[in-house]
């Protein structure tokens, strides 16, 4: 059976995790990999070495899911703000009998600020996230991905749009 790998990117706070969790339940035989799980460190150190490591971790896990007969739909949610990240993942994957769907979730700055502030108020994120996340919004419009606007939509509605692709 042909498998589908959904590469769902978006800036921090756009709703990737919520959408991916709903999508996992709406697709048959689905599994969700949150890319952040492959690089959850304290301190969070960004170097060429750690960037290569996280890519290797993600590719390894995606291959495990692709080659497991239990799963037909594999979902990766991660901050994929550069085309080189998406290209590296696509070039690294065993894509025989696999369809890939690179998708960027995007929203307005106003929506993003409101979502992040809600997380900050809840103690889930720190204040510095807003400027870093807002700065990445324009990067997603330049990517070779399907774009889904999330403003005013529930994770369920967005997951429905993705499922219909």
Image (cartoon, rainbow, N blue to C red):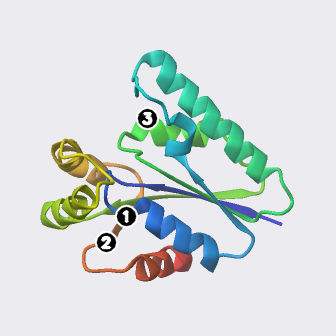
Neighbour class for label 2 at 10 Å: few (<14), some, many (≥20)? many
Q: Rounded to the nearest whole Å, what is the CA distance between mark 3 and mark 2?
A: 24 Å
Q: Residue at x 19, y 41 (%)?
A: 128
Asked if residue 2 can be seen in this view, the reply is yes
Q: Rounded to the nearest whole Å, what is the CA distance between mark 2 and mark 1?
A: 8 Å
Q: Is the C-beta separation of discs 2 and 1 under 8 Å?
A: yes
Badge 3 or badge 1: first in the primary sequence = 1
Which element carries disc 1, helix, strand or loop?
A: loop
Near-viewer residue (99 or 117): 117
Residue 2: x %, y % from top left: 77, 64
Residue 21: x %, y % from top left: 54, 68
The image quadrant that residue 73 belongs to is: bottom right
Q: Residue at x 71, y 48 (%)?
A: 95
- Picture disc at residue 34: none
Which element carries disc 3, helix, strand or loop?
A: helix
Near-viewer residue (19 or 136): 19
- Look at mark 1 in the image and give the residue it sits on: 15
- Picture disc at residue 150: 2
Report the residue that reaches farthest toward the right.
69
Which element carries disc 2, helix, strand or loop?
A: loop
Circle nearer the viewer, 3 or 1: 1
Q: Residue at x 65, y 76 (%)?
A: 27
Q: Residue at x 50, y 16 (%)?
A: 49
Q: Is residue 54 above or below residue 11?
A: above
Near-viewer residue (154 or 85): 154
Q: Rounded to the nearest whole Å, what is the CA distance between mark 3 and mark 1?
A: 22 Å
Neighbour class for label 1 at 10 Å: few (<14), some, many (≥20)? many
């Amino acid at each position: 059976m042909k498998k589908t790998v959904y590469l769902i990117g978006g800036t921090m706070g756009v709703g990737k995790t919520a959408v991916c969790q709903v999508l996992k339940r709406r697709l048959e035989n689905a599994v969700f990999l949150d890319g952040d799980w492959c690089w959850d460190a304290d301190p969070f150190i960004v170097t060429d070495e750690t960037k290569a490591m996280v890519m290797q971790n993600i590719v390894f896990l995606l291959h495990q899911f692709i080659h497991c007969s239990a799963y037909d739909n594999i979902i990766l949610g991660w901050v994929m703000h550069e085309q080189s990240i998406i290209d590296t993942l696509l070039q690294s994957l065993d894509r025989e009998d696999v369809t890939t769907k690179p998708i960027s979730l995007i929203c307005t700055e106003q929506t993003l600020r409101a979502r992040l502030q809600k997380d900050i108020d809840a103690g889930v994120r720190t204040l510095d996230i807003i400027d870093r996340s807002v700065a990445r919004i324009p990067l997603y419009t330049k990517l070779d991905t399907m774009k889904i606007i999330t403003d005013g939509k529930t994770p369920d509605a967005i997951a429905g749009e993705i499922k219909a692709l």
